[in-house]
Amino acid sequence: MNKLQKISAALCLFASLAAFAADSKSKVEIKIRPIDPKEAAKVSYSRDIKPILANDCDECHSSDDHKSDFDISSVATLKKHGKKAGPGVIPGKPDDSAIVKYIRGLANGPQMPKGETPLSEQELHLIRSWIAAGAVDDSATFVAAAAVRKKQPINASADLINAFIFGNSDDQFAARRAIRLSLVPPPPAPPKVSGPVFNDIDRFIVAKWEAAKLPAARTAPAVCDDETFIRRVYLDLVGVIPAAESSRDFVADKTPGKRAKLVDALLSRNEAYAAEWTPFWQEALASESTVGGVATHGDYTDFIYQSFLQNKPYDLMVAELLDPTMPGHKKSSRANANGKSNLIGFVRNETYQDTIQTAANTAQVFLGTGMKCASCHSHFLNKEWPQKRFTAFAGLFGSNDLELIRCEKKSGVFIPSAFPFDLPDAPTIVPKGVQERLHYMTTLLIDPANPRFAKTIVNRLWKRYLGLGLFEPVDDFRLDRPASHPELLAWLADDFLRHNCDLKHTIRLILNSRTYQLRYNPALEDNFNVQKPDEPRYVRSPSLRRLTAEQFIDSIHQAAAKKWDGKRLYRTTTATALTRDLGRPAARNEISTGRAEDVAVVQSLELLNGDELHHFVYDGEILDQLASQADVHKAIDELYWTVLNRPATARELKLGMAYLKKSQPAPVKEPWGDMLWALVVSPEFQYIR
């Protein structure tokens, strides 16, 4: 190193030392206080912490200009790493949190806020206390509660509309739901009744019995036995029958509250719960590339599965599907078919026909409202939907207002785009640009004040678990046809919204009701006749429900193959004669929210003679195991526990013994196989009772 280089190096070292000394000298010690856990729990992020950060940190660390990759705009971003340090906030560990270290001047860098007056002792204490108490984000509840306390109309000002209608951060999404929910009038309170109830759902049901002076009001229908309950709830929540050991253990268990515990245990099996819901939404979204068809709507299988695996709030799942501005939005793609490039996704808006079809699909799936007839003329059967009203709604899915085209004849009249329902204090000015319009439409679609969004999904849950919806058909929600129990529908929808659109919460509520647990009684079973839609329904018995193809085939594997690998039918990519005959569609080119439940000869023929079911049954390990059973009575009983999740009755044991005596002794496996075959094709196996 020459003399000049030595001088240069010395000057650099001197400058660094001077800067370090100046930096150290400029740091101000801020006293810290002991943290009282009770007092810390009272610290509010929205009231106490956010104003401090906005006043002292926003200039350098906002969502627009987050220096060193540190963003203080939300609790979620506060918990992330910056460029030079660890997480800004570590819940429960204030003094390990980078934000506290920088505020105190203990980090390797300048004290924050840089070049400004340091925070006060009280401000630091509030931040440390909030972090120590878990760094709770109370954005959603705080804003709504403040507005209610002040008795002010919420969202009446342009500022609030801009902040909560046209915002999509995690904080804004949750806050918008809470604020808008505060505008919703309270639902009817659960009525007081004298009959037996397990929860508030039952009060609405029993109240109708009492009002109609039904015998059920004096002597309530019995609940199902434990054998029926475990089979019913397994199929409903995880899509397969329980193992024989699980059924026997549950029946033998005399612990109070065991049914509620089982519901919780099955709901916690997230993978199986997601697998059970995925086929419904594959068909509701016309999710393709799993069972065939020309791709138009895209493959949403993983999007659906992950949403249910995470128990994502339902309104958030819908927003991520429809709103291209959402962080979790599944983007549309393009694909070539027949020499043409096509837009692939649930929202398709490149042509007039695609746009109105997307609007009709959205209304059907998420509003339970059939609008397709109104796409080319005013609805003949439902005066609620003149063509202009539907066309105005459809315009929200494209970049421009749509022309009124009646029966393929252009009118030259363009209908101003508009949301079809008047929502309190919601903005009515439709933005320009397709992304902005889709965001606007989605926000109003999932709005708690929307009279159909929450009611539609809770009605789908009711139909899924009881057999008939509170309003029927479930895709024809209309003003001139009230629900069988309108107060219950309103109460369930409100409860769903107030629990943050948590599907598991409402499912748990329904399955823990006495109504769900009633014994199936064909004499009391409700029916819906489209020719007589106003006939009363009383829900004194669940309706008989056919197993889906997925439930049937997955349960066959569960029963016959003791070492089943757990591969579910919904993951397969091909259709077979058996799956088609059991109702699984061969392709999903059209939106569908329900499968046909009628029976046909072709189903019986496939179950009795089809090769696929034959192999499922005869290749199962259960047959070899039972063939080695010395006690024939026990073997027959085990078959019933395995397939029907209950013991064989005395008559069934007698019939089984008689059947085996007539069977040929060789090969050993055949007699058991024939018995198992008879059980799996029996009506009792094919239905949820």
Image (cartoon, grey):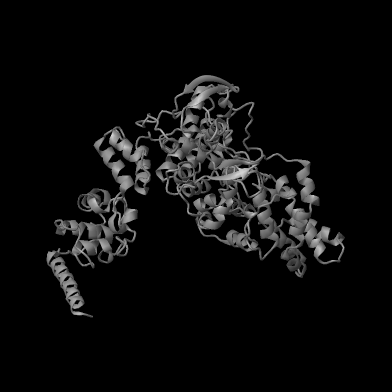
Residue 391 vertical position relative to residue 142 in the rendered view, above or below: above
Of residues 60 and 191, the one drawn nearer to the viewer in this rendering: 60
Q: Is residue 625 above or below residue 362?
A: below
Is residue 319 in view from this perspective? yes
Image check: 131 left or right of 293?
Answer: left
- Please report the residue visible at 16 percent of the width from the left and 66 percent of the height from the top: 23
The residue nearer to you, when weighing 81 against 178, is 81
Identify the residue at horizontal 78%, vertical 43% (top origin): 602
Residue 461, position in %: x, y? 54, 43
Residues 353 and 375: in front is 353
Q: Is residue 620 above or below residue 458?
A: below
Identified at 52% across, 60% down, the residue is 255
**Residue pictured at 76% horizontal, 50% vertical:** 607
Q: Quadrant of the N terminus?
A: bottom left
Residue 241: give x, y in percent of width and height: 63, 55
Residue 262, position as x, y percentages in the image: 53, 56
Look at the image and tell me whether residue 222 can be seen: no
In the rendered image, the residue lying farthest to the bottom is 1
Q: How many marks?
A: 0
Residue 119 is left or right of residue 289, and the answer is left
